[in-house]
């Protein structure tokens, strides 16, 4: 087990290095950020001076090695646009994104599993069929469109929910939370629903499939036959086993979650990391982009590692030599 | 399904609850929320030259001078008076008794420090200004003399955007801190900046020009047009800048809102390259292009009337503005004739580039122009992109034809022309924004000569002539329109606010009745 | 092939499943519409001589001020919404099939190598696949386009393919491993068939069924993703038609009551994706019930 973890950690480091290298190579093709940075009035001389002050006149490999060295110490460089440390800029917005993603994940998981179980019990009822039809919509409507449609209905026509921003936030020391004020909660409903919808539909379908298989297993059939209370059979015997693949997939969806949080944050002007990323793309603020990608890679790899370890721990059949 | 119902009822409950609390929390202190279209980038006043960021900074910092009123007249601020001693030197007398927000006294050393800081490209986007300065001599705490590297008529005209920072605290802090916690002498003190959400300022009771009328200001930037509109109609903004033109009618018909359209100074125009051998090198072809564009239709349909036809880039406040210039008017049949005479009866291919996130409706204007060109047979490719990509293409001269907006806050044509239309000259610093690399000897000479004339009247005449020649004879560029800026003000608070022509949101100019 | 197909159990099952029939009807409708767009559309919205600001922001014909031939109204540049949707579907389908072709062939090739030869090559390909997949297709495409700063249909296809190939490779590898030990492959190898012949002639045809399922699911995902990328402004440029771009453009007008600029393209996009998903659902159950839906 220990060897397995060490091996996975080394693998993660290799992936991170590759990701950063690829980013660097791609930046060579992207536009010249120095011209923008030096300002509207800058002369060519100024531009060259900025270039050398940022080390951008150095050969590619020197720039890369310096970046890696600094990154290892938590220094990912300064934003070209605001001239502030990029890591600080991104981490400042982390709470907003985490709160949105977690809320969405909770909605998706609870509603997805709950509905999935209901549908699997009576697969041919009208209710189940309509839920399945809706879930087809859930996986078919792209997140950005879901956001716009929700805004059109709840913010424009009904006028009951705010269409943008985070509302009132409270600073809890290092964490700025929007979940403890009424205004904040009101503001999170639409974006969280938007972000949750796709995952909800995916988890619903997964739960349904997995439940349908398990409900035909012998031990469940026996449990029914013994006359155990239905709730006990469903939750204790069937669902517990049906959830294993669902949880695994939910864990692996983290990359999708990050991608769609970028879309959601853009539509709802949510002051999170994704919003910053899109702005930075349009401002060619490369250091922020690289930092964001590295951070996303780190989060994804860490979560995957945890999922793998848990899996190995829970399922003794799997051996990692 | 049940979950859904629970969600709905929760929504209803929360909405009801907040509605109640909103009604009870009537405003006691004078607080207003201003919504704008672009967020603050940095709190370091030399870190960004965008209108919007300078506008935020103008609340926290002061320059030696300031611009006020509808015409943007230059008024004393931290300098009480100034004098041009000779071609190169300027003397300034500074205001006494001014304090920075941290309690430090404002003196000549702060001015010297702030201006010298502008020379460093690592922290400053105003290096052009920094490089104009040869030396700064402190005569006493409240008097100083600045020598420029060359004779600059407009030197003092740009000081309103160069804000003075506190030397003592700035030297102690690093760049990251400078960019987050501003310390100035301005009418408002910095309170809190949550990036992506808001910037909060609170009144400076000891402001040298007297305490402003409003105590607390919240700036919220909403970049998405549609969302900004939603914020306005839902009452989230007391004042909004950058009201989308497409929504003018909707805002104007809302009885709770007052809409103000402020003619702004920025002109939108097309730059045309004249590389020998290309169709655009022929002045007749350039004229045909100008004639193909139905500017009236652009103004009514794309700008929704929020623009004024321009006959030239400078506006009437600028030295060198020539009221006699005749605009080349829309005339597609004549345009076709001109093309035929020039030997391009079947048209030709070209590329029109432009930004898509910089000026009001910028990409839509470019799109419309391309359509007009198609109608006289010119096959123009539209190439619009974010300013961060377009900008470098412009400054490195990669364009064939480019859309640009321009206004020169120095109110002087020779600087504008030197940057935009003088042939590219790296050493002399000319043509840095001549994105199409237009080259004309006569124009170059006239621009250079303008800087040598010392007599104000003669200089103005010379500049007017330069302006006329470049449009009427050479069709050097094609002016489209001056854009207006739209502001909406909520009526119930009885806010008195007169928007500025430079788009800055200066809170001390806002008051309650 | 045709005759036997109409007698096969697949055809029988297909006819009895309304979802599948509706789904494939929608697909066929969209394919035809996209293919014959220049003939059906009253206007070529990207031919600049045809579009004029004269007809800007017209509502659909059945509303007041509506005008023929602008059935679904026009946008703020005077483009006919209906025509633009037709041309936009073209882009959607070009990107969709472009990805299927590129990612599909790359994935099938790599998966086949991986499964057939095993060993180090297999480990490397699969490890690389795991890595890109854990970053998710959408995230990688967004990063890639964001960094590159270039826009266009080809760029979008490439961006989606960066991780798009993995699912094909995994599926193909699985099938290859399964088929490798079959008697006829052994027999072919014994007769001295070269590796390429063996792979292409004997292995590939027998491992294709699950690939079709992945393709059907993928098509829906890719079309949605292209719309998303264009909506964010990193996909197809302004000068090319795209449903995502139309929605982004129309969004500014939603609050002023000009709903047609958003709802029609949105409706078309949803219909197309739902149609493909309906068909894909059926195909999966029919061909390979074991592949789980994972995007």
Image: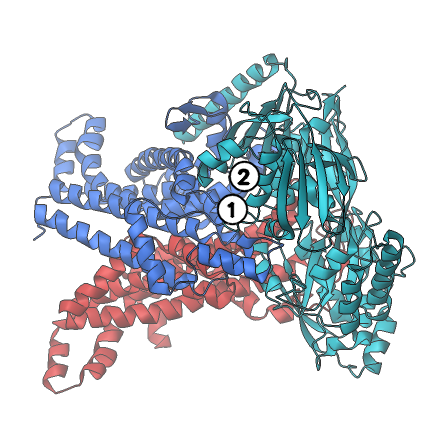
Whether labels 2 and 1 belong to a single chain: the reply is: yes
> Which residue is label 1 attached to?
B123
Q: Position of residue A232 (x, y in %)?
A: 19, 27
Farthest bottom residue?
Answer: C192
Of residues A282 and C193, which is closer to you in this image? Answer: A282
Chain letter for the cyan part: B
B259 relative to A316, above or below: above
Q: Earlier in the sequence, mark 2 or mark 1?
A: 2
Question: Pointer 1 indicates a residue of which chain?
Answer: B
Q: Is residue C23 visible?
A: no
Question: Pointer 2 indicates a residue of which chain?
Answer: B
**Quadrant housing the C terminus of chain B:** top right
The color chain C is rendered in? red
Q: Position of residue C92 (x, y in %)?
A: 50, 62
> Which residue is label 2 attached to?
B44
Labels 2 & 1 near each other (Cβ < 8 A): yes
The residue under the point 78% across, 77% down is B282
Q: Is residue A240 visible?
A: yes
Q: Is residue C101 left or right of residue B197?
A: left
The color chain A is rendered in? blue
Farthest front residue?
Answer: B139
Q: Is residue A98 left or right of residue C260?
A: left
Q: Position of residue B77 (x, y in %)?
A: 71, 32
């Amino acid at each position: 087990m220990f060897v397995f973890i060490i091996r996975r950690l080394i693998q993660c480091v290799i992936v991170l290095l590759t990701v950063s290298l690829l980013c660097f190579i791609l930046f060579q093709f992207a536009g010249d950020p120095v011209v923008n940075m030096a300002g509207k009035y800058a002369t060519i001389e100024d531009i060259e001076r900025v270039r050398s002050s940022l080390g951008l006149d150095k050969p590619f490999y020197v720039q890369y090695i310096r970046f890696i060295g600094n990154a290892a110490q938590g220094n990912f460089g300064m934003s070209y646009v605001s001239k502030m440390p990029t890591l600080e800029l991104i981490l400042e917005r982390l709470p907003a994104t985490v709160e949105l993603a977690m809320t969405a994940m909770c909605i998706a998981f609870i509603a997805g599993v709950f509905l999935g179980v209901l549908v699997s019990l009576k697969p041919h009822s009208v209710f189940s069929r309509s839920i399945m039809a809706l879930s087809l919509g859930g996986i078919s409507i792209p997140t950005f469109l879901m956001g716009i449609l929700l805004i059109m209905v709840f913010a424009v026509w009904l006028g009951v929910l705010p269409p943008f921003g985070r509302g009132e936030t409270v600073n809890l020391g290092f964490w700025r939370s929007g979940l403890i004020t009424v205004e904040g909660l009101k503001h999170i409903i639409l974006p969280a629903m938007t972000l949750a919808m796709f995952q909800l539909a995916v988890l619903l379908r997964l739960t349904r499939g997995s439940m349908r298989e398990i409900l035909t297993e012998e031990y469940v059939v026996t449990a029914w036959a013994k006359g155990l209370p239905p709730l006990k059979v469903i939750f204790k015997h069937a669902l517990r086993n049906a959830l294993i693949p669902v949880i695994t997939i939910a864990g692996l969806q983290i990359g999708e979650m990050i991608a769609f949080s970028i879309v959601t944050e853009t539509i709802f002007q949510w002051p999170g990391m994704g919003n910053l990323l899109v702005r930075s793309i349009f401002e060619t603020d490369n250091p922020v982009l690289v930092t964001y990608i590295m951070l996303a890679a780190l989060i994804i790899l860490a979560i995957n590692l945890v999922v793998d370890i848990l899996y190995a721990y829970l399922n003794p059949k799997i051996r990692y030599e | 399904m049940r979950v859904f119902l629970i969600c709905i009822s929760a929504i209803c409950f929360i909405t009801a609850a907040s509605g109640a609390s909103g009604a009870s929390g009537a405003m006691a202190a004078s607080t207003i929320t201003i919504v704008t279209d672009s967020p603050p980038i940095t709190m370091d006043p030399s870190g960004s030259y965008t209108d919007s960021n300078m506008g935020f900074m103008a609340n926290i910092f002061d320059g030696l001078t300031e611009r006020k009123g509808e015409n943007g007249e230059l008024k004393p601020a931290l300098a009480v008076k100034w004098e041009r001693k000779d071609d190169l030197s300027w003397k300034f007398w500074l205001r006494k008794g001014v304090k920075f927000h941290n309690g430090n006294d404002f003196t000549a050393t702060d001015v010297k420090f702030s201006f010298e800081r502008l020379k460093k490209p690592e922290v400053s986007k105003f290096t052009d200004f920094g490089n104009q300065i040869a030396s700064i001599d402190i005569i006493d705490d409240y008097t100083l003399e600045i020598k420029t590297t060359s004779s600059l008529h407009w030197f003092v005209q740009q000081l309103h955007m160069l804000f003075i920072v506190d030397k003592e605290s700035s030297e102690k802090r690093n760049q990251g801190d400078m960019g987050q916690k501003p310390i100035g002498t301005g009418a408002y003190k910095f309170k809190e900046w949550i990036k992506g959400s808001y910037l909060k300022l609170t009144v400076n009771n000891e402001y040298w020009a007297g305490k402003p009328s409003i105590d607390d200001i919240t700036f919220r930037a909403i970049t998405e047009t549609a969302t900004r509109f939603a914020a306005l109609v839902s009452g989230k903004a007391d004042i909004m800048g950058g009201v989308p033109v497409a929504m003018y009618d909707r805002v104007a018909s809302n009885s709770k809102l007052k809409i103000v359209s402020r003619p702004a100074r920025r002109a939108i125009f097309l730059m045309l390259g004249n590389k020998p051998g290309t169709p655009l090198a022929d002045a007749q072809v350039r004229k045909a292009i100008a004639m193909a564009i139905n500017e009236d239709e652009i103004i009514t349909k794309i700008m929704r009337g929020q623009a004024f036809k321009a006959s030239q880039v400078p506006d009437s406040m600028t030295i060198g503005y020539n009221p006699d210039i005749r605009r080349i008017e829309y005339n597609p049949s004549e345009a076709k004739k001109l093309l035929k005479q020039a030997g391009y009866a079947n048209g030709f291919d070209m590329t029109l580039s432009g930004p898509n996130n910089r000026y009001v409706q910028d990409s839509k204007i470019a799109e419309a122009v391309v359509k007009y060109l198609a109608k006289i047979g010119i096959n123009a490719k539209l190439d619009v992109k974010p300013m961060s990509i377009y900008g470098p293409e412009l400054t490195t001269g990669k364009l064939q034809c480019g859309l640009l907006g321009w206004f020169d806050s120095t109110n002087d044509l020779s600087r504008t022309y030197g940057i935009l239309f003088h042939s590219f000259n790296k050493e002399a610093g000319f043509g840095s924004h001549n994105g199409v690399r237009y080259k004309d000897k006569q124009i170059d000479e006239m621009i250079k000569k303008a800087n040598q004339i010392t007599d104000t009247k003669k200089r103005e005449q010379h500049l007017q002539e330069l302006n006329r020649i470049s449009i009427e004879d050479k069709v050097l560029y094609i002016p489209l329109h001056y854009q207006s800026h739209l502001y909406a003000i909520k009526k119930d608070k009885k806010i008195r606010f007169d928007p500025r022509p430079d788009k800055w949101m200066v809170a001390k100019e806002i008051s309650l009745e | 092939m045709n005759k036997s197909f109409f007698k096969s159990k697949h055809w029988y099952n297909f006819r009895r499943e309304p979802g599948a029939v509706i789904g494939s009807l929608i697909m066929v409708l969209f394919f035809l519409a996209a293919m014959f767009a220049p003939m059906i559309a009253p206007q070529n919205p990207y031919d600049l001589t045809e579009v004029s600001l004269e007809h800007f922001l017209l509502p659909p014909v059945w509303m007041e001020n509506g005008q023929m031939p602008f059935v679904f109204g026009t946008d703020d540049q005077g483009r006919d919404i209906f025509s633009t949707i037709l041309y936009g579907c073209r882009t959607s389908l070009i990107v969709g099939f472009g990805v299927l072709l590129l990612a599909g062939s790359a994935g099938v090739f790599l998966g086949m190598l991986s499964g057939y030869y095993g060993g180090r090559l297999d480990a490397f390909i699969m490890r690389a696949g795991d890595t890109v997949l854990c970053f998710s297709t959408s995230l990688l495409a967004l990063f890639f386009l964001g960094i590159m700063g270039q826009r266009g249909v080809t760029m979008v296809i490439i961006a989606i393919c960066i991780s798009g190939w993995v699912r094909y490779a995994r599926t193909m590898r699985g099938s290859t491993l399964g088929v490798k030990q079959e008697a006829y492959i052994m027999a072919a190898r014994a007769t001295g068939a070269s590796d390429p012949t063996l792979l292409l002639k004997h292995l590939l045809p027998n491992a294709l069924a699950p690939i079709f399922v992945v393709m059907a699911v993928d098509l829906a995902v890719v079309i949605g993703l292209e719309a998303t990328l264009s909506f964010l402004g990193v996909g197809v440029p302004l000068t090319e038609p795209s449903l995502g771009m139309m929605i982004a453009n129309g969004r500014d007008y939603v609050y002023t009551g000009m709903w047609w600029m958003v709802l029609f393209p949105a409706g078309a996009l949803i219909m197309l994706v739902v149609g493909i998903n309906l068909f894909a659902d059926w195909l999966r159950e029919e061909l390979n019930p074991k592949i789980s839906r994972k995007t």
